[in-house]
Amino acid sequence: MYWFASEAQGLLWELLLMGVVLDAACPPNCKCGQFEVNCSNAGLTTFPISLPLNTRRLDLNTNSIEEINSLELNLLGDLVYLDCSHNRIIEISRLHFIGMAKLVYLDLSYNSIRTISWTVFGPLTNLIILRLNNNPNLSEIDSGAFSTNAGLREINLSYNGLLYLNTTSLKNLEGLKAVYLAGNPWECQCTIGHLSEWMFENNETFPGTLMVFFERQKMFKEDDGEDIKQYRSYKTTVRLTNINL
């Protein structure tokens, strides 16, 4: 009888200690459940540390995080869902996602990201949904940026600062179902022509009705001679806007 009581008491202490360890692994101002860490609107200014290693869903939206901690993030090898939207992230690199082979959902919208190099998303071979919208400083995406993300089904690039987009970044994604491009200050260049052709060939990939507006600006003065005018071209910009019927 005494042995049973001692054994039960030992088990109780073990469970209590386990609970303390799990609580200690939960970052301040965050909520941790089974396989989930919710730090949404937690007032964070830096990437959280000491995250539970079995985390599969990490929500960091609506904070003031400026930099992703690659060391902390890459410890989460089972992560499938990562929401870093509504922060102040400026730069992302391949180092941030080296251990993220299982990730299927990545939201980096509403940040200050400037460029996307072709190596950034290389490790994310199982990525399905990627949201990069509302990064007003995002003006360049390298061709082949999504070349290893064959499973991508949805990409949101709307309301960024994109002037052009090389179609090689997208056209080889056979499973792609939706691309959002509205609200970018597109410039009419050869690359935008290729994009336009590809869009018309794959119009089911672009939700809603896509309207294209051209705005021409004269590059010469009215009192310039005809010999000058004929050598000066118009500046043409193209705006793509999603219209929901």
Image (spheres, rainbow, N blue to C red):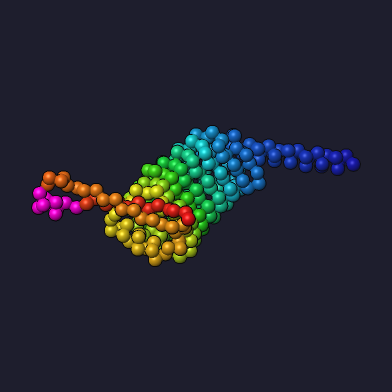
Q: Nearer the viewer, residue 121 or 18?
A: 121
In-front residue for pair 10/97: 97
Q: Is residue 25 left or right of residue 100?
A: right
Residue 197 at x, y = what percent? 35, 63
Position above or below: 86 against 142: above
Q: Quadrant of residue 170?
A: bottom left
**Residue at image location 41% in from the left, 57% down from the top:** 210
Residue lying furthest right: 1
Residue 58: x, y in percent?
56, 45
In this rendering, the answer to whether 31 lies above or below 200 is above
How far from the left and from the top, in percent, is residue 137?
A: 37, 43
Evaluate whether residue 219 shows in this view. Answer: yes
Question: Any magenta on residue 46?
Answer: no
Report whether 10 appears left or right of 224.
Answer: right
Residue 235 falls left or right of residue 7: left
Q: Quadrant of residue 21?
A: top right
Which residues lie in the magenta part? 225-233
Q: Quadrant of the image for the N terminus?
A: top right
Is residue 99 visible in the rendered image? The answer is no
Q: Residue at x 49, y 43 (%)?
A: 85
234 in relation to 40, above or below: below
Q: Position of residue 177 (x, y in %)?
A: 48, 61
- Report the residue at 31% width, 53% height from top: 214
Tag count: 0
Residue 226 lies in the magenta-colored region: yes
| Closer-to-camera residue (51/195) | 195
